[in-house]
Image: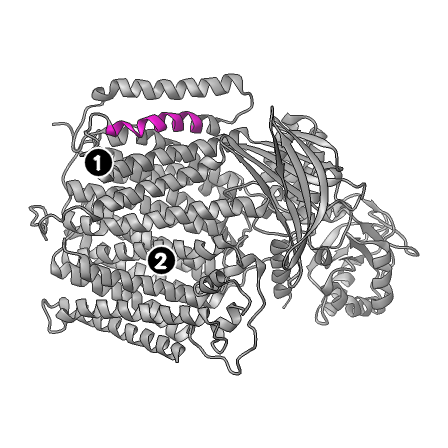
Amino acid sequence: MRRLVYLACALLMIAQPRLSLAQGSGPTPELANRQLADPAKEKAASQVMHALRCIQCQGQSIADSDAPMAATMRAEVRQQIADGKKPDAIRQWMIERYGEWVSFEPDMKGSGLLLWAAPLLLLLLALFMARGLFRRKS
Amino acid sequence: MIAETGLAALWLAAAMALLQLVGGLTLIRGEGRLTPVIKPAALIQGALCVVSFASLMWLFYTTDLSVLLVASNSHIDKPLIFKLAGTWGNHEGSMLLWVSVLSLSGAAIALLEKRIDTRTLQATLAVQAFVALGFFAFLLFSSNPFERLFPAPVEGAGLNPLLQDIGLAFHPPTLYIGYVGLSVAFSFAVAAMLTRQVGPAFARAMRPWVLGAWIFLTVGITAGSYWAYYELGWGGWWFWDPVENASLMPWLAATALLHSVSVLATRNALRAWTIMLALVAFAMSMAGTFLVRSGILTSVHAFAVDPERGSFILALMLMYTSLAFLVFATRIGTVKQGEPFQIISREGGIVANNIFLSVILAIVLIGTLYPLAAEAMGDKISVGPPYFNKATVPIALLLMIALLLGPLLRWRRDELKRYKYWLVAFFAVSLWTGVAIWRFVPGVGIFPILGLALSLALAIAAWVPLKGRNLLRTPLPVFGMVIAHFGLAVSVFGMAAESGFSRETLTALAPGETTKVADWQVKLDDVRPVVGDNWVATEGQLVARNKHKNFVLRPQSRQFYRPEQQTSEAALLTRWNGQLYAVIAQPDENGDGRWQVRLWWKPFVTFIWFGGLLVAFGGAIALLGRMFRRPKKPAVNKWAQA
Amino acid sequence: MNRPWLLWLPLAVVAFIGGLAIYGLVVPKDDMVHSAMVGRKLPEFSLPPATEGVEGLSSRDLADGKPRLLNIFASWCIPCKAEAPYLEALKKSGAEIDAIAIRDKPEDVAAFLSEFGNPFRRIGSDSEMGVQLKLGSSGVPETYIIGGDGTILYQHIGDIRAEHVPMLLEKLQEAG
């Protein structure tokens, strides 16, 4: 049943981005919907935001979501970038709180290694399979 | 009565499919007594399915609320077009549509196909009936669209505003028709393996179906992408969401198949590989349907989820694909290696196309299923856009490089030096574009630069196959190919321009204030309430000004009631060189009288979908050419041997 | 074909994907996002009172040597109303409960407390969800067990039901 409630909540979040009834009301942090003044920093922040998964509306990145939690997370990312933190450190900061799940980009270690190696391995496999097709010049 | 007629027709159609299958089984021991039944049974099955589907459509047209499906999916006050679209806008109806198109395709093959030998034709129809039977069983035993409801309600279920969208009414059936086309290719491939007739005649018979399916899939994906772009309100057009991937994978397989089948038809090579792709394409379409329905992966598009039906589709998928691959493993060894060719040849180019497309397909499949596999190992991870972009874009760029030259090459063998001037020209265009962007526009990523450079070269290269031809005597499929390849260049240009050069402004404005995005001065003129059928909205009036002209945009923040929900309606200003995308949101709680405004200038973004439609249009031209060519003599082919 | 094993590869892939799909259907999917902060020190924070007549909450209040429960709730959240009696029961059994109200207004919190009771020692107001983010919390309601030294010991996601009460009390006992 609790799962159902959560599912229902998740569905509500998807269909009803800012329903006042279901999500309460409070101030949105300033940096959630304002850019940083420095374009280079904003660009770095934007990349981080696109690589983080929204906690409430599970399929979207926090950059594409209207959920309040996504707004809070955007503000946090921009604040940390403004404070001079490196993008990867911010990703780690989020992972420390929500686990690997929150990052859309698995690390190149452990179980993620195979994932990142896949393109190259597949390309090699395909070339290996295709090599018999060709005839040498006669 | 109409509902009962529809149900009876469905049962009879299922019986016909069974008859076809039994007739097909007698084929194994040579010509059996039931074999001649196959063709007429296919025709009758098609006719019965038309009756059944027409019945359901009639029930929706008259809003017959004594039928459960109508009562729960329609409403007496719905506009007519949405009443009719309601026929397939639900699970049962869409499955009936699926099986009806499947049966009609079978009837069309029975009636029109003259290129392949009778045994292979009969075997194809039998396999087709086998596939259809699964869906008949699904419909009749677990999702009967004609079930009655007693007592009948007075007005039907409420109107869901989100589903009253013309895009949503036609998007799923477009994809489904594409999937059915792939199932026909699947039937041809299995039949050809069984009768050991994997050769050019088989390839020519299968090709129009692959082409047709591929056109529908292309249109479906293009439309779906645009829908997500204007509906979700954050300016993205592809999210690498599991459901999007589910529609992309069959398309990738179909694209590869489309190319390899032409090698088989023209040059009698790539036999086993073409069969393999036909099986994979159908398996991917089933897998896609399963992923969408089962909800085993977390997706934005969660509204179609129904685990029980998901398991039924999974069972069907596993049965069909494992049987087919079993036949493949045991039979394909007897199919002889095709005609040989050299690396530098048209065949070689198409092999490159197939390799790159297959690798992209495998990456998308692995990336989509990886979180599930990781969860089974006790790890909770996400695989999203950053991974998919980094993993697939380089391979897509390789594919584009191969595409520059591939269509120019001769069959069997060719020499690169014949094309040295073209190669130099393509290289010069790419290099010049790349360096120019890198030099004059700082901060553009490597992928957008390469994408723009290659798409410009391809926009030229695509037309070169027409050079030196008498255009009046050039076959339509060649025109189709040229247009489709040009369309791809257009689409990639749009994607690269959008991802490399988009400008974003997020701000809060009080009425009268002005902001800037790219070269546009945008002023919030006014904010006022607007009332709709079942919603109220705050509408912002934005005046966008570039050098000399003013344009008005009216984005809305809508509040629906019954059911209560809030949506942002983006306003789009389309110029030839891009789109201005504006969203207004409800004011902050901070309450200083300012409105949250999001603005994007997306250069050449419309090229993405325009290019996609061009690709489909090229496919349609090629299909016309394939369908209205005088049929050659039924192939007595020196290569076609068991 | 000189590599017959390759022909069986597609079938193997189908089997693997089929197995994965069946796993996905059979094993219920865990849709919850668990906090990765369990086992670590509470982050530093200091929240103002959520409504008149209650005290605000800071991380130092939670690290005063006594283990207690930290409830994340909101007046607009329906499951939070459902769990109110069980929070009351926990309090009666001796648990000390602090709370954080998410995106709430003082008058709404006051109305909620007067209707469903107030088992809380302190209630901080996290109107921008910043503390929720620091805690790795993903929604309302959630209940944490905080050790006396301010370590997060356990996270309960979703509303507390009758069957959870003894379990939470036991874990609280272990912490002390």
Which residue is tagged 2? C15
Q: Position of residue A119 (x, y in %)?
A: 40, 38
The amino acid type of the residue labelled 2 equals Ala
> Which numbered marker is on residue B347?
1
Q: Is residue B588 left or right of residue B154?
A: right
Q: Residue at x 44, y 27 (%)?
A: B452
Categorize mark 1 by other alpha carbons within 10 Å: few (<14), some (14-19), many (20+): many
On the question of residue B258 being in view, the answer is yes
In this view, the residue in front, B248 or B542, is B542
In the rendered image, the vertical position of residue B350 relative to residue C133, given as above or below? above
Q: Residue at x 36, y 17 (%)?
A: B428
Q: Position of residue B561 (x, y in %)?
A: 67, 61
In the rendered image, the vertical position of residue C44 relative to residue B100, given as above or below? above
Q: Secondary structure at mark 2?
A: helix
Image: magenta residue range: B451-466
Q: Secondary structure at mark 1?
A: helix
**Which of the two discs, 2 and 1, sits closer to the camera?**
1
Q: Is residue B223 magenta?
A: no
The amino acid type of the residue labelled 1 equals Glu
Q: Residue at x 37, y 55 (%)?
A: B285
Q: Is residue C5 left or right of residue C14?
A: left
Categorize mark 2 by other alpha carbons within 10 Å: few (<14), some (14-19), many (20+): some
Q: Chain of mark 1?
A: B
Q: Chain of mark 2?
A: C
Q: Position of residue B574 (x, y in %)?
A: 53, 36
In this view, the residue in front, B260 or B536, is B536
Q: Rounded to the nearest whole Å, what is the CA distance between mark 2 and mark 1? A: 32 Å
Mainly helix, strand or loop, the magenta region?
A: helix
* Marks 2/1 same chain: no
